[in-house]
Amino acid sequence: KSFDAVRVEIRTDIGDLLPRVMTLYHDTRNRSEWQFEELTPAYFEGILTHMAGRSFCALYFVGDELLAANLIVHDEQLAIDKFFCMDGERGRPYNLYFLSWFTNLRYCLDHGLSRYQSGQAYYENKVRLGSQLTANTMFFRHRNRLLQALLRLVSPLFSQDEAT
């Protein structure tokens, strides 16, 4: 139902809408239980400019009002959902989070991309929509051998992944 009321634009240049995208980004960041990094307008512009042909922003409008934006990067096989931001109050009735998910899957199918990486946070919804969670591993080596040995011993204590 929501697709009928929402206009989706796929853009590689959002310069004219960047102030609104940043407002949506801050709205999303402020209401999140997760602490996302502080991204700047230059980040969004830089991704779209320096990754031309490998990035886009899906914009979600109701009437002429931009209610959500989704930054995606991709190669020939994989699309990565970098950041979804939305006007929480006005966007939720249109199920924009879920619409963005299906828009991204449609983009992958239309462009022959075999994988979609749905990004961090809100794992429950992503699993419900069919994502599979994979464990992350971080490798490190400190230059100081003694400190490296100590870090190797204590690093499992800092892992936030649950055993699978």
Image (spheres, grey):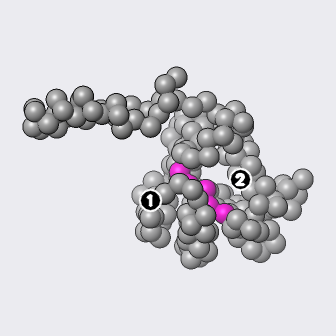
The kind of secondary structure element at disc 2 is helix
Q: Position of residue 113 (x, y in %)?
A: 61, 35
**Figure check: 105 above or below 72:** above
Residue shown at 61%/41% (left/top)? Answer: 123
Q: Which residues are magenta?
A: 82-86
Q: Position of residue 149 (x, y in %)?
A: 16, 29
Q: Which mark is residue 97?
A: 2
Nearer-the-camera pick, 16 or 163? 163
Kindly identify the amino acid type of the residue bearing the numbered disc 1. Answer: Glu
Mark 1 and mark 2 in contact? Answer it, CB < 8 Å: no
Please give left or right for residue 148 compared with residue 158 in the image. Answer: left
Please give left or right for residue 70 compared with residue 50 in the image. Answer: right
Q: Position of residue 144 (x, y in %)?
A: 9, 37
Q: Which mark is residue 37?
A: 1
Please give left or right for residue 65 compared with residue 76 in the image. Answer: right
* Label whose residue precedes the other's in the sequence (1 or 2): 1
Residue 108 falls in image quadrant? top right
Q: Position of residue 46 (x, y in %)?
A: 43, 63
Nearer-the-camera pick, 109 or 100? 100
Q: Which mark is residue 60?
A: none
Judge whether residue 123 is colored magenta.
Answer: no
